[in-house]
Image (spheres, coloured by chain):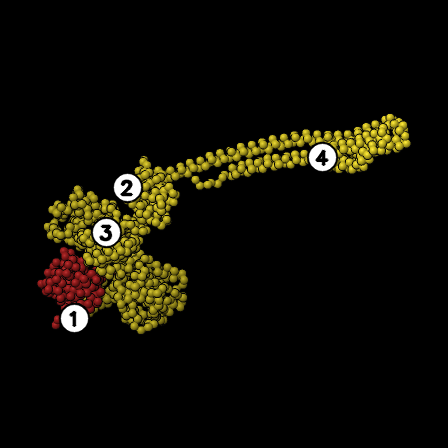
Chain colours: A yellow, B red
Amino acid sequence: MESRAIPFIKRNTRLGVGTILALAILVLGASLFLFERQQTSISRYSEVRKAGEAYLSSLKDIETSYRGYVIVGSEAYLDPYKEALAALPSRFSELKDALVAANINLSVTERATGSSQKVVDFAKRVIEARRISVEEARALVRSGQGKTVMDEARDAIADITSIADANSNILRKNGTITFTIAAILSLLAIAVASYALFRIAKLARQDEESARLITSDIVVNAPIGLAILDADNVITQHNKSFAQLVGKPDTSVVSQNLSETTWNFHEASKLIQDGCRKCRHTHEPVFLDNVEVTDGDEPRFLDITIFPVSASRYSRKSKRGAGVVLTDVTRQRKWELELEEARNAAEASNRAKSAFLANMSHELRTPLTAVLGYCELIEDDLADSPESHIIPDLQKISLNAKHLLTLINDVLDLSKIEAQKMEVHSIEFNISDMLKEIEAATGSLVLKNENQLVLKQATPNMKMLNDDLKIKQVLLNLVSNASKFTSNGTVTVAVEDFTREGTPFTRFRVSDTGIGMTKEQIKGLFERFNQADTTTTRKYGGTGLGLALTRALAHILGGEILVDSTPGQGSVFTLEVPTDFKAKAVEEPAEGDGVKKPAAMTDKEKENAALVLIVDDEPSARELLERLLEKEGFATVSVSNGAQALEKLKDTKPIAVLLDIMMPGMDGWHVLRAIRKNPDTANIPVIIQTVLDDQNFAFAMGASGFIKKPVKRQQLSEILGDLETQNTESRALIIDGDEKSSAELKAMLEEDGWKVTISADADTAKEDVKDEPPNVIIVDMKSSDMRNYKYAKDLQQARNWSAIPLVVMTSEGERAKKVKTLHTKSKIPDGTMNLAELVLELRRFSQMPQASAESQNTAHQIEVSNG
Amino acid sequence: MARILLVEDSEQIYDFLSRRLQKRGHEVLMAHDGETGLEAAKSSLPEIVLLDMNLPVMDGWTVAKSLRADPSTQAIPIIALTAHALAGDRERVMQAGCTDYHPKPIDFTKLLSQIDDLVNIDKKASP
């Protein structure tokens, strides 16, 4: 358990306990100190007593000495007297010192001083008297005066000592009480503090225990799978979610070895083992994102993190244990997929819209052709007749029809660009030739407003490798615009080379001296149907689409169009395009505008007729495959990781992908899934080549083939051979009823990459599609005529083609068709749609992997369309 | 002037186109579907074929391929008339065996010069 912060209150309690303890010690210390001082005081009082007694004893010596002298009369008896007399002042000063030390007022000595002087004086008188006569001395002694002064001195000294004794007694008594109380208090404080400490320790233990319980509750119940593996990938500990996520919700998986598990977590466990190996090697965590595991029917997605665990009980020698964290990201994944689907749907519908516009524009052109054709025919007829005055009116019809045609062409071009059908055909051309053509084409328009066209080239003989027609289209538009908005002025086309970020570019600058534009007018100039303002449309004509188209064209050419203008002085439009379109296209794979750069593609497609994409992180494995494939006559392209593979597939269409599974970063399963999910790549065969033993899983994931490493040439050529026969284009068989719509559908399907056969009836159909069963049979019926339907049904039965979807199409109004699919498993929706929509549906169908591989004996049900 | 085979199923287009071509002195043979067009080309061997690509019975692509496959007709120039005008159409019609390409709507002046060019080349090549 990690150390935790002690809660605030607990910290305060500890502080309190500390204070109590400190106080207790202080009190004990203080009382000891006081006791010590008291002992000193007591000893000083006893010094006073001693000094007093010593003083008294000197006085007694004096008394005894003079009495002996009186009785004996020998001077020798006076020696003690003399000594005592001499000692008396020092004895007295000792007494005084003792009193001062004991802090007792010296006034108490006054009586003692006086009485002791009396004793000394009396002794002197007695000794004097003895020297004179014994009798006199005896009489003096008998007078009792000596006893009186002596008693007085004794009393005075006793007074002094008694004061000291009394003080000493009081002190001794008080000291004992104080000390006892202090001791009790200290002991009490220590007891309290100890108890508090004990409580705190107990609380802390409880706290730790409950925290441990909470942590283990979290670990056990968190919806994140946690497990620790030992050095041999044996699970030593795991929580509930781990067991749940690996598909063993009610059992313990402790002591199971990850490599021996048979759970449905199988595939992920391989990835984990791989991750553990890497993790032990690098000592860095390994992250595996969006690993798919099967949970019943529902796929689940896990984010897996593997991290090194160094604790010795999980590790052995240099091999470490590993921690595994499983996070269920199925929900997030689902959202992501839903988002992606929504985006795809939106993109598809946008493309469908543009395709519709392209088709519609195309439909509009057909009647216009007739209008123009007949106008010109009549003009021809009338030229030499008396009715020739009608000709100007006819010319107005022609002119308007042509204007309408230009408008439609612009719409068509724009929608082609948006439907990503506009292709760039780059060729090498001479810029001055192109300028001459522009001069010729715009001559009348330039002259109309009495303008002059000036062509300038920075260097003679400038050349470009780009789409000449599109550049010309842009320049024609710019020059005719410039001439329209300029009168009596000059329109200049200047060309120069420059370099942008290392890529050679060519700049065409079309400037005029016309009316110019304000900043507001420039804003939105390149939007559709937006001329400088609506009145200009009336005054100067034009479709309002020209500049939008011009810019779109500039973009697909890899360039840009810029404008600068001053009102009243003129405008400058600048077209900057790469001098070599392909160099530019290769350098930055087409992004922006959602426009493909198909020039690079179409060429590549031709070259790549038998191209195989190799995806392997090991250079030696790549080389081996390249060699083997080249021997088999395939072209190869190799990449070293999944992301590169997906990037590559954006602009190459290999006939197959050879995919390794265990790769750093995105593993092979992810790559496979991404390939299958993208409609553009969904039907590219993917062959898994790996050391893993996951053939069934590979096929379940949508692999087209499986090769166990090391790859053998024999095996590889067999699998690729199978694919070659499998992987031909989608084929449609149309059984003809309505000639016109069949032909139209055929053209449209072919446009969309189908191989289409139209057969009049079942018998010819049998011959027509003898060797290649179609992927779909379309029966085009005249509303009441059931024959074709019968043909198709016969055909299905005769050829055992019951699994091939049978689409029955009947006319529903002018353009619409009622479509019904007579195959329960097919994904072509029934309903009323036009041919373009049907083509889209068929494309979707053909891109589903099961379209070609669907079991031939699937039971089906045929209904007769009532449409 | 040239003997032209016009294979076109749209009545309005073949009507005015044939009349205008005839006015310019061309001889115009007509067929309204691919199959009769192919037969007409083989039987009457025109100097040039104007071929709509979107035809009933047999489409223009098949007609062009068949004409190129037959030694008697493989030298006849074909101008493809297509309404698609989509990028790549030119390449596709050329691959199918056509000699030139004219997107609809018809620019009559241009068509005349295309015809002239091809017939003249043809005449120069095999006088």
Chain hosting mark 2:
A
| Dot in front, 4 or 1 | 4
| Alpha carbons under labels 4 and 1: distance apart | 156 Å
Q: Judge if badges 1 and 3 mark residues of a common chain.
A: no
| Alpha carbons under labels 1 and 3: distance apart | 65 Å
Q: Which residue is mark 1?
A: B120
Residue A475 place in picture, x, y as percent = 31, 66
User: Is any part of residue A547 visible from this angle?
Assistant: no
Chain hosting mark 1:
B
Q: CB atoms at circles 2 and 4 under 8 Å apart?
A: no
Q: Any mark on residue A511, and which?
A: none
Q: Which residue is mark 2?
A: A260
| Amino acid at dot 1 | Asn
The residue nearer to you, when weighing A99 against B57, is A99
Q: Judge if badges 2 and 4 mark residues of a common chain.
A: yes
The quadrant of the rendering that contains the C terminus of chain A is top left
Dot 1 surroundings within 10 Å: few (below 14), some, or many (20 or more)?
Answer: some
| Dot in front, 2 or 4 | 4
Looking at the image, which residue sits at the far left? Answer: B43
| Alpha carbons under labels 1 and 2: distance apart | 82 Å
Q: Which residue is mark 4?
A: A44
| Dot in front, 3 or 4 | 4
Q: Judge if badges 4 and 1 mark residues of a common chain.
A: no
| Amino acid at dot 2 | Glu
Q: Which residue is mark 3?
A: A710
The residue nearer to you, when weighing A724 against A352, is A724
Give the mark, 3 or 4, whose residue is nearer the N terminus: 4
Give the mark, 2 or 3, whose residue is nearer the N terminus: 2
